[in-house]
Amino acid sequence: MVSRVLGRALADDPLMPWLYPKIKSRAAKAQRGFESQAWLAYSLSNGIEVAVDGAGVVAGCALWFGSHQVANMTVTDHVRSWRLNGWRSRPPTLYSQMHSAAQIAEHHWHLNAIGTRADMRGRGFGRDLVESGLARCHADGLPAHLETTAPENVSFYEQFGFEVTSVLDEPRVGPRTWLMRYQP
């Protein structure tokens, strides 16, 4: 369910066509990628946030990783990720390496993915998901980091106190990306 909601919600994100250039298989591949990320977010950090409407329908999801917990990935975690993403993972790997090199090496919570269903946008579910994760940051006394490839998202995150720390612009490695940090 989480992977389906995120795959559909982020289908128009600038990163998706870059990671998955074939239009016919993009949605299925994105969903598999989010399935892998959701499994890791849950198993490593219990970092899945879900927003539901009054009728109990899932409106949106967010995946949070604790940086101090990602280092605990097991061989099984890596194999599961490989099986879901397949052999041809060069673009995601280059993109991940670019971000790893640019990120601050401090313990933090990382907002890996967030999305709301198209028919439920504008009703505060995205705001609720961000605020729920930031409450975790406050409780742990840790900052939050995220990246976005959608320029319109920068002002959305700034409303919560996130600040742009860097802009990565390397077309052969991925789309323009804003790295952002939140200090509780």
Image (cartoon, rainbow, N blue to C red):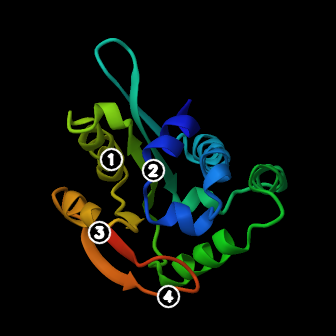
Please give the residue where the numbered disc 4 appears in the rendered image: 170
The relative height of residue 52 versus residue 181 in the rendered view (above or below) is above
Q: Residue at x 34, y 63 (%)?
A: 143
**Amino acid on which the number 2 mark rests in the picture:** Leu
- Nearest to N terminus: mark 2 or mark 3: 2
Between the C-alphas of marks 4 and 1, the distance is: 36 Å
Dot 2 lies on which element? loop
Amino acid type of the residue tagged 3 in the rendering: Pro
Q: Nearer the viewer, residue 140 or 85?
A: 85
- Give the left or right position of residue 166, taking residue 171 as reference: left
User: Circle 3 sits in a helix, a strand or a loop, which is it?
Assistant: helix
- Asked whether 96 or 14 is in front, the reply is 14
Q: Choose top left, top right, bottom left or bottom right for residue 78.
A: bottom right
Which residue is at 57% across, 39% downward?
3
Label located before the other in sequence (4 or 1):
1
Type of the residue with mark 1:
Ala
Real-space Cα distance between discs 2 and 3? 14 Å
Instruction: Tell me residue 19's x, y (percent).
Output: 61, 66
Instruction: Give the CA separation, mark 1 to mark 3.
Output: 29 Å
